Image (spheres, helix red, strand yellow):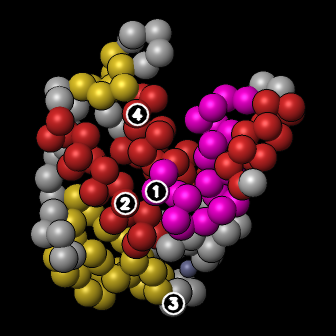
Amino acid sequence: MRCPKCKNFDTKVIDSRIAEDSTTIRRRRECEKCSARFTTFERMEFINFLVTKNSWEKEMYDRTKLQRSIMKALHKRMPDIEKIEKILNELENEWASNKKWITSKRIGKDVLNKLKDVDDVAYIRFASIYHNFDKVNDFIKFIKEEFE
Ligand SMILES: [Zn+2]
């Protein structure tokens, strides 16, 4: 686990506890170099379902991939990691309980709806990834519709 502050690889766990949803272990860590403290989350349960893409290709759901695109949208917005983790846990439970597979479109839409409550800028950024805007005008039109 890399220190988010100095990028050092040696960190020690100073506390770990099971989060309220009982499927996640929350760990407090401390960097051995700069002493920065941060929190990580570990899922106990393996959530397993297929994602169908627009082309009808199927792939295994990949939390890391989804999380990466959310964090990209939250870049420099001081994201509340705990909140994002909680949102993902909730959504994953929903997705996994419904069917054996879920469309990538639905995933994007659900995340988008949740981000709306977290951060306006992140919401817009994620929307631009999700809707795959290729023209500036499409993007401006979308923002107008959402915020007018
Ligand atoms: Zn550090």
Look at mark 1 in the image and give the residue it sits on. Answer: 114
**3 and 4 marks in contact (CB < 8 Å):** no
Residue 76 appears in which quarter of the rendering? bottom right
- Secondary structure under tag 3 reads loop
- Residue furthest front in the image: 148
Q: Mark 1 Cα within 10 Å, few/some/many (few <14, many 20+)? A: some
Q: Position of residue 116 (x, y in %)?
A: 55, 59
Residue 8 in view in this figure: no
Q: CA distance from mark 1 to mark 3?
A: 33 Å
Residue 118 on the magenta span: yes
Label 4 sits on a secondary structure element that is helix
Quickly name the residue at label 4: 106
Question: Dividing the picture into quarters, in which one does residue 71 lie?
Answer: bottom right
Picture quadrant of ligand 1 = bottom right
Marks 1, 3: nearer the viewer? 1
Q: CA separation, marks 3 and 2?
A: 29 Å
Residue 62 sits above or below residue 45 on the image: above
Amino acid of disc 1: Lys
Mark before the other along the chain sequence, 4 or 2? 2
Circles 2, 1 touching at the beta carbon (< 8 Å)? yes
Residue range highlighted in magenta: 113-133
For marks 4 and 1, the one nearer the N-term is 4
Between marks 3 and 2 in the image, the one whose residue lies nearer the viewer: 2
Q: Residues within 10 Å of mark 2 (few under 14, many from 20)?
A: some
Q: Nearer the viewer, residue 55 or 120?
A: 120
Question: Mark number for residue 87?
Answer: 2
Q: Nearer the viewer, residue 135 or 76?
A: 135
The residue tagged 3 is 35
Q: Ligand 1: does it lie within 8 Å of the C-beta at label 3?
A: yes
